[in-house]
């Protein structure tokens, strides 16, 4: 199957639906691309893999792109990756250039998304070819490296580490599978729950609870006020023209590359990508003092970088089985529902699915552009959607999706509710959802590869002497931890005012 023949009318319809739903989630403050994917993930249960990918990638691209709407109009980033869009986008709106700012952001988003898709196509297979030669030792070290990024992903180093360890611990609940070196016993389960938790907690209800119900509970605690539509009228002021990009192609490509590279590094996140691209643009700008006052190049840098993140974050997901960000972590659930294992063998064994990923990612970006560019006057109205009407509908969708995840098991609904409440109260004491879910997803694989390594070689020293690749991975692990400790130290100094 080549890239062109992979397109079917059903998948085009699913991509369009995903993009439009994602835009709505991204445009409403408090609702993110991750939440969009988590809430809609159960819909993929009745779809094949190709159709599932079409829907989810549409949600991903639409959710990231939709964040620019409130960022520009009401100075509230719809998604964390849109935070720097507020720096120049909102001042442009204040000067009567709201529609111009929105369309600059939309075009920049398209360029960033297409750039990252090209990088994904070129580099994911090459990375998978290298990783396919890994033994159990290297696979364990890859997982260990992925777990160290929990520290970088965390707002607070200690809280993030505790969240990640808690995720790993809960991932081990259930039967210690004989196929992974276990003894078949049920562990970490009280006796009266052995029948219920014999297979542990299912991934999908956990994801929906943490990224769906938790967010809704937090918004409900604030009183779910209906944010008023911005008072800016589209069409006032200076009109948009494509000539605004003249002289800024370097900005677009450079910022897209930064976003893609940050996406390739698991756990760094879209907010870091946009901040880094914006800062880099300010350093290279001919008029750096103007950035932050309503300069189009600031919007270009922010939006091309955060959409560049989409393809970049898919690279470690597809080639190594490691989520690049919280949204791709949720996407693992779709592959789990289809009974597929992501990792070095995925592209070679499922070439059709690989073509679908590429096709739908490109298609999603194109659909996003046409939907947002030509219908932006209507899209901005989603800021008016009353949350007291929207959120109950989402809760019902989450509950039904959790129930259907494993062909109708009521315990999955209780799991969804349990982890939703757990996430809500966990946030109040400092626990973080993203590190937790990374630990939950990777915990079992880490155990399997560790046990298999010990069975194969019989000594712990093999993790340090196996191969130059293993030593290189240790270097990456040390650098990742070192960077996290440096960030924590710098944040501590900033808070203390020294």
Image (cartoon, grey):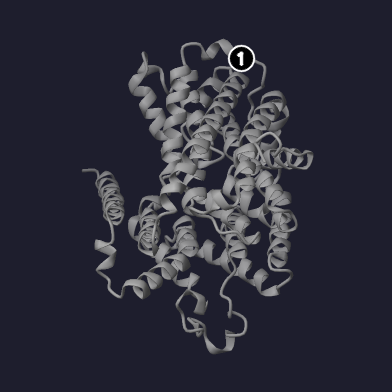
Q: Residue at x 62, y 32 (%)?
A: 365
Q: Residue at x 62, y 50 (%)?
A: 37
Residue identified by numbered label 1: 240
Regarding mark 1 in the picture, which secondary structure is present there?
Answer: loop
Camera-side residue of 311 and 23: 311
Camera-side residue of 217 and 288: 288
User: Image check: 249 left or right of 492?
Assistant: right
Residue 380 figure quarter:
top right
Point out residue 331 in the picture as x, y percentages from the top left corner: 58, 52
Q: Residue at x 66, y 43 (%)?
A: 226
Camera-side residue of 360 and 181: 181
User: Image check: 367 left or right of 324?
Assistant: right
User: Image check: 300 left or right of 37?
Assistant: left
Check disc 1: other Cα within 10 Å, few if <14, some if 14-19, many if 20+: some
| Quadrant, the N terminus | top right
Residue at the limit of the structure toward the bottom, as seen here: 191
Residue 265 figure quarter:
top left
Point out residue 305 in the picture as x, y percentages from the top left corner: 47, 32
- Residue 274 appears in view: no
Q: In the rendered view, would you say 241 is above or below 57?
A: above
């Amino acid at each position: 199957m080549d890239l062109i023949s992979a397109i079917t009318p059903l998948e085009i319809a699913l991509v369009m639906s995903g993009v439009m739903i994602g835009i709505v989630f991204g445009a409403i403050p408090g609702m993110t691309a991750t939440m969009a994917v988590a809430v809609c993930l159960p819909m993929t249960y009745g779809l094949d893999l190709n159709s599932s990918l079409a829907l989810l990638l549409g949600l991903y691209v639409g959710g990231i792109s939709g964040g620019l709407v409130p960022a520009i109009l009401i100075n509230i980033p719809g998604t964390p990756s849109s935070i720097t869009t507020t720096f120049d986008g909102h001042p442009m709106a204040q000067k009567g250039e709201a529609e111009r700012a929105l369309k600059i952001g939309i075009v920049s988003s398209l360029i960033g998304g297409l750039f990252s898709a090209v990088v994904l196509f070129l580099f994911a297979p090459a990375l998978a070819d290298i990783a396919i030669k890994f033994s159990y030792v290297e696979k364990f070290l890859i997982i260990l490296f992925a777990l160290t990024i929990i520290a970088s992903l965390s707002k607070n180093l200690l809280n993030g580490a505790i969240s990640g360890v808690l995720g790993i611990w809960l991932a081990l609940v259930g039967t210690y599978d004989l196929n992974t070196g276990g003894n078949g016993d049920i562990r970490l389960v009280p006796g009266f729950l052995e029948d219920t938790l014999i297979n542990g907690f299912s991934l999908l209800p956990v994801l929906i609870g943490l990224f769906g119900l938790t967010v809704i509970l937090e918004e409900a605690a604030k009183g779910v006020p209906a944010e008023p539509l911005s008072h800016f009228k589209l069409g006032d002021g200076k009109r948009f023209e494509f000539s605004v990009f003249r002289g800024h192609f370097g900005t677009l490509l450079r910022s897209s590359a930064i976003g893609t590279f940050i996406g390739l590094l698991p756990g760094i996140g879209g907010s870091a990508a946009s901040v880094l691209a914006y800062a880099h643009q300010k350093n290279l700008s001919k008029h750096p003092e103007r950035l932050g006052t309503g300069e189009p190049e600031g919007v270009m840098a922010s939006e091309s970088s955060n959409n560049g993140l989409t393809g970049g974050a898919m690279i470690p997901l597809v080639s190594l089985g490691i989520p690049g960000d919280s949204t791709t972590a949720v996407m693992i659930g779709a592959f789990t529902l289809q009974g597929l294992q992501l990792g070095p063998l995925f592209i070679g064994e499922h070439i059709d699915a690989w073509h679908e990923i590429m096709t739908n990612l490109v298609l999603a970006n194109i659909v996003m552009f046409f939907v947002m560019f030509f219908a932006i006057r209507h899209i901005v109205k989603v800021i008016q959607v009353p949350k007291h009407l929207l959120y109950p509908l989402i809760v019902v969708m989450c509950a039904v999706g959790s129930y259907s995840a494993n062909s109708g098991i009521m315990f999955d609904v209780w799991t969804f509710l349990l982890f939703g409440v757990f996430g809500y109260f966990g946030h109040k004491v400092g626990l973080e959802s993203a590190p937790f879910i990374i630990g939950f997803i990777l915990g079992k694989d880490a155990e399997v590869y560790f046990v298999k390594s010990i069975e194969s070689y019989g000594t712990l020293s093999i993790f340090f002497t196996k191969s130059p690749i293993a030593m290189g991975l240790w270097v990456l692990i040390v650098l990742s931890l070192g960077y996290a400790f440096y960030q924590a130290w710098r944040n501590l100094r900033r808070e203390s005012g020294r």
